[in-house]
Image: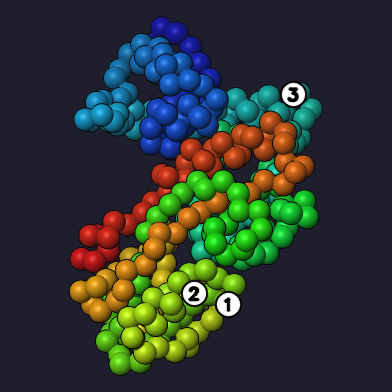
Amino acid sequence: MSHALDIDQLRTFLAIAELGSFTKAGEAVHKTQSAVSMQMRRLEERVGQPIFIKDGRQSRLTEQGLRLVEYARRMIQLNDETLLAFNGKKEVGFVKLGVPDDYADRLLPQVLAAFNRLNPSIEVQVECTSSVKLTKAVRDNELDVAITTSGDTSELRGEIIRREPLYWVTSEQHSAHTQDVLRLALGPSSCSWRRLSMDALDRAGRQYRVSYTSASGSALIGAVQAGLALTVFPESAIRDGMRILDERDGFPALPHCDIAMLRSDNARLPMHDRLCNHIIAAIGNVGTVSSREAAE
């Protein structure tokens, strides 16, 4: 290797590795797709190894590319730590982000960890609560940005950034779904999924009772995994050990679930743009379970 590696190229490379595509990476690092492609060609020339390989219409990391990921992370972190140590700036930005509990364990580890590596001087403070409370907090400028379930509130509907199927879910190890009177674990009365599921069962003539009500997705998951009740979840929230139920099991189809992004009137600085653009670029890359995989 005859030339020093370029930190900006490594940032773009890491964005591709973490977001899964050149297009999403370009949006996250504010570069056109052609600029991203040019940077990656130059990076390959510098390391002297192919780091991407064509896989149909997509590009994936080669073995050498996978090796480069960890080196890139370490180099970027050291570069940023060095600059912060000598420029006297302890904090460049501070953003308050709200996330529903249903999505916190999926969104936070993947999306925000990647954002932190790409933007180490922007601190993100996270609040997890219901979509209704998040919407009010954005309206009152108590939060800068929030991810909400569209339909839980009629206020500040925001920009739809993700649409995914909504499924009936039970435990693979239990048979709560075979009972004559179904026991349900659902969100509070303000939850749109609760209304959708109850209306669907009413139309199908299925008997049920809501045995567990909680605004916490973790609490609903616990009830399902223990075999105490069924629930409804979007595809991205389905875990190992859960089984999707459909018409073959006697359960009516449910509509799609829309995920929206809200921004307060005060959240118009470049750091807010960077976080919003990163979430929009990455949200489609949050790990999901296909209906076929979950049903097996």
Can you tell which mark lies on residue 213? none
Q: Secondary structure at mark 3?
A: helix
Q: Which residue is mark 1?
A: 189
The answer to the question of whether label 1 and label 2 lie on touching residues, with beta carbons closer than 8 A, is: yes
In-front residue for pair 220/134: 134
Sequence-first tag of 1 and 3: 3
Residue 37 rendering spot, x and y as whole percentages = 39, 18
Residue ID at (32%, 13%)? 48
Provide the residue designation for mark 2. 194
Q: Earlier in the sequence, mark 1 or mark 2?
A: 1
Q: Residue at x 21, y 30 (%)?
A: 56
How far apart in space, not on screen, are marks 1 and 2 (Cα)? 7 Å
Marks 1 and 3, how far apart in space? 53 Å
Residue appearing at x 77%, y 51% in the figure: 141
The residue lying furthest to the top in this view is: 2
Question: Which of disc 2 and disc 3 is earlier in sequence?
Answer: 3
Mark 3 lies on residue: 86
Identify residue type, mark 2: Arg
- The quadrant in which the C terminus is found is bottom left
Foreground: 289 or 149? Answer: 149
Q: Residue at x 69, y 31 (%)?
A: 270
Q: What is the x, y in percent for residue 3?
A: 45, 8
Q: Is residue 174 left or right of residue 266?
A: left
Q: Give whichever of 223, 183 is nearer the camera.
A: 183
Q: Quadrant of residue 174?
A: bottom left
**Does 271 sit left or right of 33 as displayed?**
right
